[in-house]
Image (cartoon, grey):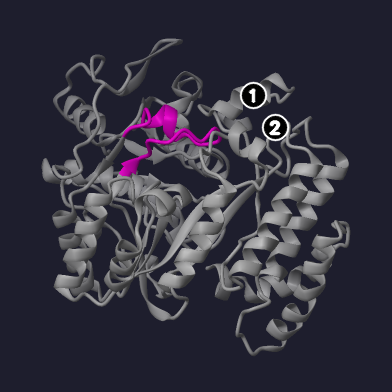
Amino acid sequence: MFYPKLETTKPRLLPMSVLTVAAPLVKDGFSVKIIDQRAGDDWKSVLARELKDKPLFVGFSSKTGKQIMNALEASHLVKETSDVPTVWGGVHASLLPAETLKNKFVDFVIVGEGESPVLKLAQALREKKSYEAIDGLGYKKGNDVFYNPQKTFVNLDEAPEIPYNLINIENYIENYSFATGKPGRNIAFYTSRGCPHRCGFCYNKEFNKSKWRGESAERLVERMKKLVKDYGITAFEIEDDEFFVDMNRAKKVCEFLIKEKLNIEIFTTCRVNYVQQRMDDDLLKLCFEAGFKSLAFGVESGSPRVQKMMAKDITNEQVFDTVRRLKKAGIGSKYYFIAGAPTETIKELYETADLIRAMKKTDPDIIIPPWRIFTPYPGTELYASSRELGFKPPKSLEEWSDYDFRKIKMPWISKKARSVIQNGIYSISFLSLQNKGGKSFYFRLSRIYGKTVDFRWKMRWFYFPEKHFIFLIKKIKHEIYG
């Protein structure tokens, strides 16, 4: 199994897409090797050595963008030096299976979750039997491509244990807690899949069919205990698409964690409407006692029209209620925004800036990472809207591999709007530093400059080139945002 690079930095998040697929293979007696391209510079020699043993196949994870570029390079090496089949899975291959299969370096595609189809494909190849009827599998016949849709989802309580022994787990343990920023041993953790909501920019509606499945509280806490015991983990970064969908489960998790006295810190995701409508002060207190020290929220825009267009199903009132109540509960919070959505106007970008300023006035300690630039991804509602507005998507894996918001032509973003967005990205970094306690020269200078940013946002002066101060952001980025 091969996990291609997503970025040039060292690995942080576990290669869960290949670890979860490897689990049933290991349970069934297959020998599995995981190569994480992020974790070493000698991946070519490692891959070449493994190919000499003629494995049944080499599996690749694929996320739209740079990971495709790196997966193509490795797939090319496989096909150039062996006759071993290549199997592509992941979100991109699942959403565009036919297009992916047309590439000469791809033999099979996994559509949807990979545990079942990959195991069945491995069994078929080992026993030299037909694989054409396997649900969730795409394949080729001559110049024609075929794929069978996924029909069922994995029951997470029945999934085999994650084979952490296949990787060097120390490569994925951070030395500080994402929940508090304090020293610790932090690891990414997953407890559910999918999301029942309908955000227009998200792949979940198509990939997971708007279904959410959570691992039972008992089982996930046992897994946490094992990681604490075996690897000395003190902080968990729960990377679920949405952790708090089932509040009864969330409450049980808190109760079990308190009972077990794990003394851990947790960072995870939530929704502002959950906090307002489904989480009373007692539950927030319970979360804090259990170790939930910081929560992240997607607000995306300060414009009610844009929120509605994105199908966020939240209000700014809920945003402020969340900011106030989490401050009262002692739980840190982080809020994400997206700029440049189809039809978004400069006036609406200003509404987002106004909301951010007001949130910071309500609680200066909240974290607002630089807003992300909207990117149209296949399988999302706003992907279709983007095409209607003149966006022309890539047509091959090679083109998708160079898919980056800095290179995408989005006709609805004017030159002036792009300037506002870009300078907003840089200036938010300074705005978030006004209440931070770093004592270095760079921190002090950034806090001073942050006060001018707040004034300029108020006056709509978005055209000062913060990018010339980007060296400051690089100095403090790791400490503030991770």
Question: What's the amino acid at mark 2?
Answer: Pro
**Disc 2 to disc 1: CB gap under 8 Å:** yes
Report x, y in % for residue 129. 17, 19
Is 470 left, or right, of 244 in this rendering? right
Residues packed near mark 2 inside 10 Å, few (<14), some (14 to 19) or many (20 plus): many
Q: Residue at x 81, y 45 (%)?
A: 418
Q: What residue is pinned by disc 2?
A: 342
* Residue 247 in view here: yes
Q: Which image quadrant is residue 113 in? A: top left
SS assignment for the magenta stretch, majority: loop
Please state, as top left, top right, bottom left or bottom right, where the N terminus lies in the image. top left
16 or 399: nearer the viewer: 16
- Residue 3 shown in magenta: no
Q: Residue at x 14, y 25 (%)?
A: 127
Is 108 left, or right, of 319 in this rendering? left
Report x, y in % for residue 290. 27, 70
Is 289 left, or right, of 218 in this rendering? right
Residue 237 tag number? none
The boundaries of the magenta stretch are 193-211
Mark 1 falls on what kind of element?
Answer: helix
Residue 385 tag number? 1
Mark 2 falls on what kind of element?
Answer: loop
Report x, y in % for residue 102. 49, 19
Q: Residue at x 44, y 23 (%)?
A: 97
Q: CA distance from mark 2 to mark 1?
A: 7 Å
